[in-house]
Image (spheres, rainbow, N blue to C red):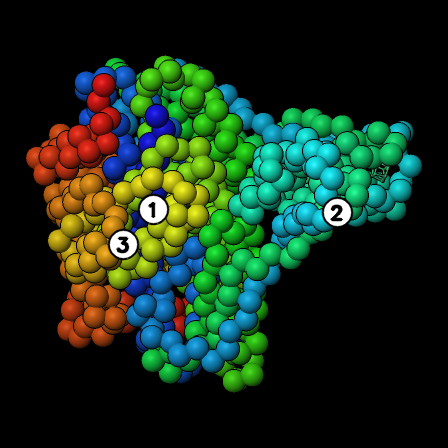
Amino acid sequence: MILAIASGKGGTGKTTLSTNLASYISEKQKVTLADLDVEEPNSGLFLDVEKDLEKDMFKKIPEWKESECILCGKCQEWCKFNCIQVLGDEVMIFPEFCHTCHMCVDLCPGSALSFKDVRMGRLSKSHKGNLTFVESRLNIGEEQAVSLISQTIDYTENYADEDELIIVDAPPGAACPVMEVVDKSDFVILVTEPTPFGLNDLKIAVETMRVLNREFAVVINRYGIGNDDVISYCKAENIDILAKINNDRKLAELYSKGNLLYKHSENLREQLDLIIEKLHLLK
Amino acid sequence: MKEIVVISGKGGTGKTSITASFAKLGAEEIVVADCDVDAADMHLVMSPEVIHTEDYYSGFVAKIDENKCTQCGACIDTCQFDAISPEFNINQYKCEGCSYCSEICPTHAIKMQELCIGQYFISKSRMNNYLIHAKLGIGADNTGKLVAMVKKEARKIAEANNLNTILVDGSPGIGCPVLSSLTGANLVCIVTESSLSGFHDLQRVYEVAKRFKLKACCIINKHDLNTKLTKQIEDYLEKEGIIHLANLPYMANFSDAMVEGKTIVEKENTIHSQLIKDSWQKIKEIVV
Ligand code: SF4
Ligand code: SF4
């Protein structure tokens, strides 16, 4: 089962929940955590893991073979992402924008375009005890986060045992990268905080879940600040609130040092137990 | 025209609360642009009255004309994104708009339609300034283009009203939207927090900001959570030539003002209010 931890906006505690839930569960059974926030993967900062391997991740982009090109200009016309420009007697390719749709390569009348691999990011796998941790980091300037995310999910699924729980830390927002993660997940936890900003972003996240027809529930972080509007909203919309994690300065201090929090907070352990129990995460 | 862009790399550092405070302090002398289009929250404390709404189109989505389609299946074989179901329905969220299917369909049954992915608004806020903000549809790609659009509108409004300062609530992350947020800016103000991930993202986003060769300044929020780390961040700022504006202490009730629909500076006599006022003063001195 793939369990995604997502949130409408960043900074609500998505990474805190993913890292603590995964580590806590790993005290009892095998579990994999994948950080798919590929633009800014931060989970690794909280995990004291040992690196097993690192590898480059690639995407395919077209390569131009001058000798075969009849300079018809079709490829530039076809590419909807402005990756190809025919300048004088040269075809220029801008790899960051390429969606690898295959059109130019398949249809080029002179067979002057073929695919080659370019590096788009780097994946690493590490472990500690029962916990496997996979992280991918997108190259700065690279546009196609979705491709790296989907490759990382495939890698993780291949690597993990058939019935192993996979927790994924999704990117923030409601754009394509998070859609890709949600689409590949079986259940989604939306993390929010009980403030007007939190509520506003939660509503957008809920809309995304409904469009994708995905089962989801909410976890409230920093419970105690703000107001009760998030709770009223969830009630009105029939959304399960799995857990409420108390706002606590001591935890904020531990977090700032990159510590896992569950070992230091009974409230957090209780709330994690609630999530584990309600979602049947233990075998 | 002077453009001040507030960014943070990481979410949850207090960026939007602080930008909204600057918006309050700048009042009618500035135009405000909410370019955090993924989590557009400025309107929640600025109470804008919308003057003008515009649909925002970007990219394309395929549409199959049932009458022309012979269900040959060529499109399904071609699509690299699994966007066409066996029943020949297009999944709008998977379709990337490449138009390959439309190109090869033997009966020309597939047309590409422009995709409306959101709206943007020109509003007058309760702070007596114009606010340009947007609402993005879900699954939208190309938010960088929407950011550029919001900024363009802000510049137009500023010119038309003889205003010379634009305040931008920038996008999170280090991708295309933040690049769009920074394009054409004069000063970038980075709001970070004293945590390992805050510092990590500060460095990553500053790598991006550096390419624009802009003047940079920084506010460290929750500085007292980890004084040792705060010192490291301060050293980093000095080494990189980033102007250090202020250290804000951790405040359990940081969101109280937000709950009342107010900005932090509207809570008088608090230490945060004073520090943010001082920061805004310094920012104004830097940009002139
Ligand atoms: S479509 Fe092929 S032959 Fe035509 S300009 Fe492009 S690369 Fe050259
Ligand atoms: S594969 Fe598609 S997106 Fe990439 S360059 Fe060719 S036409 Fe453009």
* Kind of residue indicated by mark 2: Lys
- Residue at horizontal 25%, vertical 50%? A238
Q: Is residue A240 left or right of residue A97?
A: left
Looking at the rendered image, the disc whose residue lies closer to the viewer, 3 or 1, is 3
Tell me if mark 3 has few (under 14), some (14-19) or many (20+) residues whose alpha carbon lies within 10 angstroms of its own: few
Pointer 2 residue: B68
Looking at the rendered image, the disc whose residue lies closer to the viewer, 2 or 3, is 2
Q: Is residue B63 left or right of residue B162?
A: right
Q: How far is disc 1 from disc 2 in space, using C-alphas?
A: 42 Å
Q: Nearer the viewer, residue A61 or B167?
A: A61
- Residue at horizontal 28%, vertical 57%? A199
- Residue at horizontal 37%, vertical 32%? A186
Pointer 1 residue: A7
Report x, y in % for residue A124: 43, 23
Report x, y in % for residue A26: 23, 21
Pointer 3 residue: A237
Chain letter of the residue beneath label 2 in the structure image: B
The extreme left residue here reads A266
Q: Nearer the viewer, residue B268 or B260?
A: B260
